[in-house]
Amino acid sequence: MFKYLQLYKSTIFLKVIFVLSIAIIFFIGGITFKHITVLKNSSIWLNKSYEVNTELERLISYIKDAETGQRGYLLSKDDSYLQPYYVSKDLVKVSFDKVSRLTKNSRTQQSNLKKLLYYINKKQNYLSKSLYLIKQNKTDEIELNKNLIEGKIAMDSIRYKIEDMMIAEKNLLNGRQKAYEDTMSYTPIFIYLTLLITLFLITSAFLKMNNDLSVLKKANNVLMVSNEANNLAEIVGNFGSWQLNIENNTYIFSDNEYRLLGHLPQEFEASLESFLKFVHPEDLEFVIEKTKNMSVDNNLPPFTYRIIRKDGQIRYFRGLGRIVENASGNKTFIGTTSDVTEEIYDKKLIEDRNRELETTNKELTAFNYIASHDLQEPLRKIETFISRLVDKDFNNISETGQQYITRIQSSASRMRVLIDDLLQFSRTNKAEKVFEKTDLNSLLENARQELGQLIEDKNAVIENTDLPMLDIIPFQIQQLFVNLIGNSLKYSKENVTPLIKIKSSLIVAKDEELLPKTKDKFYKISVEDNGIGFEQEYANKIFILFNRLHNKNQFDGTGIGLAICKKIVENHKGYIFAEGHPNEGSVFTIYLPTT
């Protein structure tokens, strides 16, 4: 039903109706011609049947005349009675040939004619034989009677066969007459139906045209509103539009195209030459080169240039366009002109800001150098002198002084750890990201060796499944393992052997609750421990730089380690999540893409 409505709404519907109407006219003409032909053929068949019957009667008449003449001669011996006999053979042959021609399209009649010819020849032979015997005075009454009897039998056969042929001809005529009557009986029905169909199609076409007129009126109203909306959109969007009719090389500018140039709408004739007068002299050659082949290339790629408005302002314009072809096959080049002056200025501002950021980054790089060299140098001296003081004069210092020295020593140590962690975080952000196909099992083993002393002190047990080969930044993934395992060791329970389980599996993102619902594949690596755990509400905060869940007097640390882990995973376009259960342990889950 929907397809029918679509067809009805299209111009194809009227074309189809036109073609069908022409076809119906030809059809009615064909039916009329057919019936005229049938009438003509019926008349021909009737005449032929009449001629056949007449000729058959004439044929038997000629044979009878020959037989009558022979009998007259037998009785009178007068040769004048033999005249019909002598001419009968030729007359019979002419009449027989005519019947043969008239019935040449009938197999039945042709078959009958063959038999009839046989009987005619037989009859003529007996007539000739009887006449011969009489003329030769060899009259044998018995033989003569026999010939006469055989002649009579042959004559009867001729008469019967001619009657058969007349009956057959009558049957043929009846059959043709019936076919004619059948044809004539359904012809009015066909013509009536075709006229009804034609009337329906013409009515449908009328309704369609009437509907099209209504739709056209509505479309004109909508087009007027659309044009006004487009004009308003051009004003709000600060752009104009233009059209080039390729057939006659004429231009049309929108109202806002004139406004962008500082003129009133339609204040001058739209043309390429008139527009080029506004182009900045330094950009004129560039614009001409860009637009000279646009009608041939069917496309005008975006390009930016300057114009000088009527009021003398210099503005930046961006033009683009392409050819469109309407339903009639006419091509029109349509284009837009946008005022991008503010965009150009903003871009320059961003470039200036980028240069400032680049300068700031250089300063940060210098700060990193200072942090890694100049700041650590006095820190090493402080630690050295305090160490000497503790070794030589610690017992000579008062108890309060000893407490101060212990605090200074602890603060210096924490400061060194803080500087090292800051440098590590900086390297994670700035290091060159060179990806290599690497076996994660070897990186995990390197992390174990790096933490070997701490693992031994804690008597920790680390279990892991086989890890995959991935395209990664090797030193960063190794640092990831070091930080996560170190975090589990740091927050282990007292008097409980730390147990760390590292597992790996291949998953699809859409099957994981925490990942976007895509078909991307990831390796899921989990690091689970039996430490002190944490409240789940802090699961996201622990990855924030310098964020700590515990007092520095309870656990050592700077609050940078997990922030480094998050940055490493992000560098690999992956995800990291934390799940904690107080006094039960925690699970850190990492998702690294397979490619």
Image (cartoon, rainbow, N blue to C red):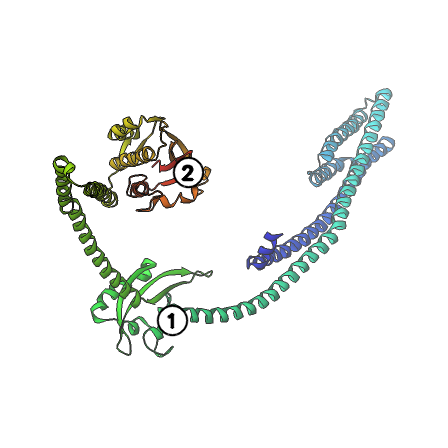
Viewer-side label of 2, 1: 2
Q: Earlier in the sequence, mark 2 or mark 1?
A: 1
Q: Relative to 105, does residue 442 appear above or below in the rendering? A: above
Q: Relative to 2, does residue 70 appear above or below in the rendering? A: above
Horizontal and vertical percent position of residue 566 = 33, 42
The amino acid at mark 2 is Gly
Q: Is residue 191 left or right of residue 345?
A: right
Disc sitting over residue 580 in the figure: 2
Residue beneath the point at 67% across and 53% down: 33
Q: Residues within 10 Å of mark 1 (few under 14, many from 20)?
A: some
Q: Secondary structure at mark 2?
A: strand
Q: Relative to 296, does residue 462 appear above or below in the rendering? A: above
Q: Looking at the rendering, which quadrant does residue 75 occupy? A: top right
Disc sitting over residue 252 in the figure: 1
Horizontal and vertical percent position of residue 261 = 32, 74
Count how many numbered circles sit on residues in the image: 2
Q: Is residue 86 left or right of residue 16?
A: right
Horizontal and vertical percent position of residue 341 = 29, 68
Q: Is residue 329 left or right of residue 68?
A: left
Query: Which sits in the foreground, 567 or 191?
Result: 567
Q: Secondary structure at mark 1?
A: strand
Query: Which sits in the foreground, 424 or 361?
Result: 424
Q: Is residue 175 visible?
A: yes
Query: Which sits in the foreground, 164 or 29?
Result: 29
Q: Looking at the rendering, which quadrant does residue 508 occupy? A: top left
Q: Residues within 10 Å of mark 2 (few under 14, many from 20)?
A: many
